[in-house]
Image (spheres, grey):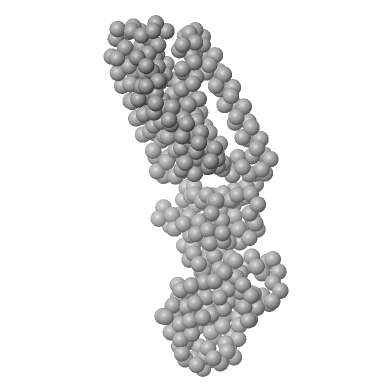
Amino acid sequence: MNILKDSKILILVVSVILSILIISFKGISFGVDLSGGTIIVLKTSKAVSQENMTIITEVLRSRLNTYGLSDITVYSRGNDEIVVEIPKNADVERIKKILTQQGVFVAKIDNITAYTGRDIEYVEKPTLTPNGYGVVLKLTDEGARKFAEVAYGKAGHRVELYMDGKLISAPVLSPGLADGKPHKDQIITVAGNNPTKEDIDEAWAIYTALKSGSLPVKLEIEYINTISPTLGEEFIKGALIAGFFAFLAVGAIISIRYKKPSIIIPILITCASEILIILGVASLINWRLDLASIAGIIASVGTGVDDQIVITDETLSKGSKKIKSSIRRAFFIIFAAAGTTIAAMLPLFVMSIGMLKGFAITTIIGVLIGVFITRPAFARIIQYMAKRGF
């Protein structure tokens, strides 16, 4: 039996090589708790349904994407909290304003609604306009018609623009816009030609709110937790040290249990291969590893060692003449254990319960990799060793 030509072994070797290449080229992304950044916890003004919570998280994600942030995580927690993780070097003050803006926009002339945020077809990024620094927008046909009806004959009156009930601009209506004809182009002016940082933040908050739509409820910041990049590096270093000692502990226990290098070394190599493949998959799907994900990797590797002990003990107890039946029995136990583990993790993954999602996905990936790649390969190695008398 040439073990290196066995298909199970080849799959393991190819998977390890591919994982190393993927990690080398794409690298591994870390979450805010490991790379540094800010965690903002928002609280809704009242408890909301799951449907509205989904709308809130989607609107907030859209606003931050519109602002130019793509490396973000937004998830709900319960029925009244939303957690937003933003990377280091982001402008936290501006993001706070963007997140807490409910985004209910109304334009009024003489206290009569001329158009609302729903009548806006297109919004441009904040810029200097002929009237000052602000946001240029385009109304829908229906919005332009409604504005024309309200504005007709009111040249010189003010167009009061409100965001969340706050007056943000009140330009004077020009005669050209009061002729009773639809005019789709409008401008929200927030400052003169030399805007301050606060003016710019205000304009961006208006822009992102109009671009993404309004929130069903008001949000306020419950608390903010900032993790420095240095602290993140310390977490990574601590996790690597913990992983190293965990590996040594596993090696020591199985050394005491089996005492034979021909069994101990394959178990340790299989464990290391499993970790590499999990990291390779995480890199491939751009999954950002956080502390919960690392805990998931450790848990899946722990179950992997358990499975290898089951395979080894079944093989040793039945002897070399009944290896196939022993391994079949071992895999029956392994598949049953894997099924229950995945079933336990699925609710955490599907319901996206905060950071536990990272734990769930890495545990599921680890279990699947173990069942379909590393355990079968280890079984072939043990089968080969048993025939050679270990």
Point out residue 212 in the picture as x, y percentages from the top left corner.
Answer: 49, 64
292 w.r.t. 126: above or below: above
Which residue appears at 36% of the width and 24% of the height? Answer: 8
Q: Is residue 239 visible?
A: yes
Left or right: residue 222 versus residue 377 is: right
Residue 345, quarter of picture: top left
254 w.r.t. 336: above or below: above
294 w.r.t. 305: above or below: below
Left or right: residue 385 versus residue 44 is: left
Q: How many numbered marks are there?
A: 0
Quadrant in which the N terminus appears: top left
Which residue appears at 46% of the width and 62% of the height? Answer: 216
User: Considering depth in this image, is 49 or 226 the residue closer to the camera?
Assistant: 226
User: Considering depth in this image, is 52 or 192 the residue closer to the camera?
Assistant: 192
Point out residue 313 in the picture as x, y percentages from the top left corner.
Answer: 39, 12
User: Considering depth in this image, is 348 or 208 the residue closer to the camera?
Assistant: 208
Q: Is residue 45 visible?
A: no
Point out residue 288 in the picture as x, y percentages from the top left corner.
Answer: 52, 42
Point out residue 337 in the picture as x, y percentages from the top left corner.
Answer: 36, 25
Which residue appears at 47% of the width and 78% of the height? Answer: 139
Residue 27, quarter of picture: top right
Quadrant in which the C terminus appears: top left
Which residue appears at 33% of the width and 25% of the height? Answer: 336
User: Considering depth in this image, is 194 or 43 the residue closer to the camera?
Assistant: 194
207 w.r.t. 236: above or below: below
